[in-house]
Image (cartoon, coloured by chain):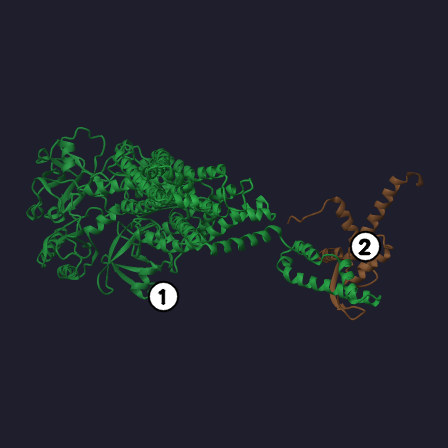
Chain colours: A brown, B green
Amino acid sequence: MPKRESPMQSEMLQGTLDMLVLRTLVIGPAHGHTIAHAIERGSEAVLQIEHGSLYPALHRLENRGWIVSFWGTSDNNRKAKYYRLTPTGRKQLAAQTTRWEEIVRAIGRILNPSTE
Amino acid sequence: MSWHRFFRRASSDRDRAEELRSYLEIETDENIARGMPADAARRAAHLKLGNTVRIREEIYRMNTIGPLETFGRDLRLALRGMRRRPGFTLAVVLTLALGIGANTAIFGVVDGVLIKPLPYPNAGELVSIKHLAPGLNVDELRMSPAQYFTYRDETRVFQQIGLYRDGGVTITGNGEPEQARLLGLTSDVLPALGVRPQLGRLFTEADAKGKGQQFPPVVILTDAYWKRRFGGDPAVIGRRLIVDSDPVEVIGVMPEGFRFLDMEPAAEVIRLFPADRSRVAIGNFNFSSLARLKPGKTVADANADIARMLPIWLNAWPTAPNTPGRQEYEKWKIAPAVLPLKDDVVGGVADMLWILMATIGMVLLIACANVANLMLVRSESRRQEFAVRTALGARRGDIVRGVLVESLALSLIGGALGVALAYGGLAVVVATAPTSLPRVEDISLDPRAVAFALVVSLISSMLFGALPALRQAAPHGAPIAGGARGASTSRERQRTRNALVVVQVALALVLLVGSGLMIRTSLALMRVPPGFTPGDAVQIARVAVPPLQVQDPERVTRLQHEILDKIAALPGVTAAAFASAVPMEGPQRVWTQPVWVDGQRDTSVTPLRRIKTVSPGYFSAIGTRLIAGRDITWRDIYGRAKVVLVSENFARELWGSPAAALGQRVRDSAPASDDGWREIVGVVQDVHEDALYQAAPAFVYWPTMMENFGGNKVFTMRAVNLVIRSEGIGRESLLNGVRSAVSSANSNLPVFLVRTMKDLYDQSMARTSFALVMLGIAAAMALALGVIGIYGVIAYVVAQRSREIGIRLALGAAPTQLKRMFVRQGLALTAVGAGVGLVTAIALTQWMSSLLFGVGRLDPATYTVVLGVLMMAAAMASYVPARRAAAVDPVETLTAE
């Protein structure tokens, strides 16, 4: 099926967002609102994401089987859809984190060769 | 991408909407908790989340299968469009349904008869063995028992070889005497076909080990006969039957679906040929043969194997008395002619069926051209719609796809309707097909035919959809508001439409020529004097006197004579006689024998001739004129007078004139002594014995009883066709009269194969009539579609140019002149189409030469008439819209818009 795949750049960002979502869920199940605020807070507001763009990412991760969803009740008694990390998702997160760190180190070496 | 998600995408979207709503509520709650007023809190939550519709769209797209989604949308659009234009839709769907239906029906026939394998396991291994004998005056030589034994013993390529022959037997001792269809065969025929009995067993070689030429006393019944005569009683195995006055035991019953090749009427009783090698001589090529090849062997291998075995056969067997010697057979130059069994069964109809298939295919092409034209007109009127869609962001591909999907939907609906039509049509085709059409039982509208209809629908949708679709996508922006049309665009479209009409006219001309030639063929056939009375005046019925019923030959003849006298006394009967066969009975009654002529110069080749035996009065009863001399009489018969009749062409061939033949002498065996000669006492008119379209064969008519004939001391013809001339043909009273006449002479004789000469004549015309009807229907459809095409184009031109016409009229042009202008345009198109069609017809009609009789395939009269008809039809088709042009009111058209 020809999916409308974005070019390399946005794919990387997409992957990054996926990783952040997975990371947020390591602590425990959370709903979309919590995840969005957690990412925003965790990055000390450096990553200003439009909260809506989180949902396609959640859907994608769910399709891949990395997270599963269930309906629950939020802290303030609202009905909300919760997401939980699956074992596959956990493995995926580990792999992506490793890869991410490699890339960061590599970029760091290029940008600051003297520090090595 | 998963189908599961694709089909759940709507509910998943609802789920998502709810999730987004839940986000908004939570965020709003939190904002209020932070002290915002409710309104601002809600707005801030919306801002934080972003455009929810876009989010949902994005997720929806992730779940969908792109092309399928757009296809569904295009389809809905197309169906809506069709409902809006019921007239257009109906015209297109019906045209296609007719075209596809006709093609599917013919495919059902072609598939059943020509393509499907015969209904036996591994039917591809089955072959029919025949021989060629270029040194002999025959088309083909079948097989002799001696060859059968040699081939069986010596072969390297055959698993089994068998001989068979059909015939009839009289069954008595089980109620009324009855004639049953007999299949005689050797023990290996049924195993070669790979069939098993449903009850009992098949023949074994041990069954055939009788003495002499008696049939072994065992029979197998077919399912139909077993059910009809024995009520399907399983205890039939071991029962005794009297077959041709011979007691036999039933040993088996064939299964329900069993059919022996294309034996018609179907076999009822199966007997085993005796296999006494001590009685077998080298000749007697009167048996058909089939064989099963060893796996992997080909027809070429089989031919080579038989070519190797022929010399072995020639030297291994004795020659029979009164038959040619060994050297004689060498002169025949016998060669093998093995062919796939299916080809043998299908025979000569392949040509005709392929011609029909091509014909009906052409009709579909014309229909597609017509539909393409309709679609062009339709898209013309949709220019605004397309312009609006383009303005709203539809791409060129979207619009082309839309048009193609619409074509597809139309042709699939047409195809579905066509399959329904084919279902009915097939019944008609099978009913009107010549009775000689082989494998009629294998013709059906099965999944293969439906698949064919589907493929044809798809192809035609491409054919008629592609043009409008591509034209549609013409890149220049069409104006959204109506008004002035780009002159260049419309001219280009007009060219496309003209080309389509040219194609239609050309194909219509080809089909008209084809049906014209068939009409000429039928007329020519009707003018052929058949040599007998073909009409409703002659009744035929067959009676056979088996040897165990009446042994003495002369008593057989006297019994037959007595029957004739009784029939002649029936009210309304003006003449009664009999013969071994009547004209047009089919190949099973063709009887070819050597006839030696006194004073014959070249005695090196056996002079094979067509013969039959006749009773006195046969020729006047059947309506064949006596040309010279006299008929034989009963006094000749009982006095064993050595007399004979011949046909006119026989007389002319040998002696130049009928009169000169009188007094000449002929005989049935090689001239050894002087006493075998028989004197020609009469010459009769030529008879088209086989079919009207085949030349009348030269005939020798022997008396029904003779001394020293065919190796018999006294020969008599035991199985004869009664020929009864009467006004009461087909009436039950006449038939009852005939039956009681026969049974009062001998109560054990059944009367069978009751027919009229008209039946036989019509049957013989059936192939031509069938082709004529089919081609006629095709040509009529083609002409109608072509005329509609021309009409459509001219009418469209007139409508488009109405302003111009208005100006011309206002400036003083004469209406007649205008009319003429448009008619001329229609005729010009037709002329171009006719030119193309003529060339095509000249090229294509060579395939139908085998169907023609008495007319050349380039018959100038046919071509002239067809051209005339086409031109006249075209003139009328363009005159109607042209008159509308002349009636244009200049004021109205000029003030319009």
Residue type at mark 1 is Pro
Q: Which residue is mark 1?
A: B234
Q: Which mark is residue A41?
A: none
Q: Is residue B529 above or below residue B174?
A: above
Task: Please give the chain letter of the residue carrying mark 2.
Answer: A
- Left/right of residue B665 with respect to residue A114 in the rendered view: left
Q: Amino acid at mark 2?
A: Leu
Q: Specify whether B75 is left or right of B108.
A: right
* Closer to us: B766 or B487: B487
Same chain letter for marks 1 and 2: no
Which of the 4 image quarters holds residue B648?
top left
Label 2 neighbour load within 10 Å: few <14, some 14-19, many 20+: some
| Residue B362 falls in image quadrant | top left
Residue displayed at 29% across by 64% down: B229
Numbered tag placed on residue A20 in the rendering: 2
Q: Secondary structure at mark 1?
A: helix
Q: Nearer the viewer, residue A54 or B357?
A: A54
Q: Is residue B199 left or right of residue B528?
A: right
Q: Nearer the viewer, residue B653 or A56?
A: A56
The quadrant where residue B709 appears: top left
Report x, y in % for residue A68: 74, 61
For marks 1 and 2, give the CA distance. Answer: 82 Å
User: Residue at the spot x=36%, y=53% of the render?
Assistant: B426
In terms of secondary structure, where does tag 2 sit?
Answer: helix
Q: Chain of mark 1?
A: B
Question: Residue furthest toward the top?
Answer: B601
